[in-house]
Image (spheres, helix red, strand yellow):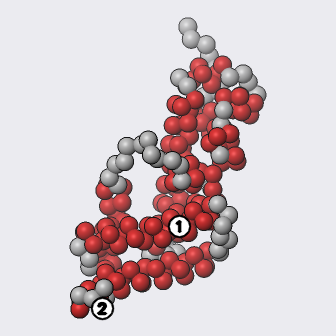
Amino acid sequence: MPPKFKFSKDEMIKNALEITRESGISALTARALAARLGCSVKPIFGLFQNMEELHQEVMHAAQQRYQNYLQEDMSKDQYPPYKASGMAYIRFAKEEPALFKLLFMRDRSDERVTEQGEEVRPLIELIQKNTGLDEEDAYLFHLEMWVYVHGIATMIATGYLQWDTEFVSKVLTDAYIGLKYRYCGKEKKDGSN
């Protein structure tokens, strides 16, 4: 009969996520988690094959937390839905900088890059609905907007910027209007760049 542990897998993941939120993923070690739980490392390795498995579970929990930010901000009606997605991304960077860095600023050179088609499809459809652009142009519009949003979020997560929500909202509106003009305005009509 396998040993019975006093901590569940979910409790360990929750505590591992808290360590990561406070100090980053590099601080998440078996010893740090055991100290937080007040136990030896044995229960950790009784529930997880290795620390890599635990790190993957923390990554999944961080992703779920980010999704909660998105859902919350997009359902508030404080901003139009597309803008709300960018505002949520930046708010996540500000309020959860260690998790933001884990999800969006880690070295991905060894990861297999996958197309984000299904993940961003709802955002592409919002752009199409709001601008009348075809799918290809809406996707390019989104990529350009996302680079801008990611830059702001990264600078906030690293402490480079201290922008308040009102100013972030203003600059996102300015960027959106500029891109809308570029893709739908004068340049598109007369062919100039």
The disc placed on residue 167 is: none
Residue 58, above or below 183: above
Looking at the rendered structure, the secondary structure element under dot 2 is helix
| Picture coordinates of residue 190, whole percent (x, y) | 23, 92
Residue 10, above or below 61: above
Would residue 12 be visible to someone looking at this image? yes
Q: Is 173 in front, or is 82?
A: 173
Give me the residue at 30% from left, 75% from top: 129
| Residue found at the far top of this picture | 1
Q: Which residue is mark 2?
A: 186
Q: Is 189 in front, or is 177?
A: 189
Give me the residue at 70% from left, 46% from top: 23
Q: Would residue 154 be found to the left or right of residue 117 on screen?
A: right
Residue 2, above or below 138: above
Q: Which residue is mark 1?
A: 151
| Picture coordinates of residue 193, whole percent (x, y) | 30, 85
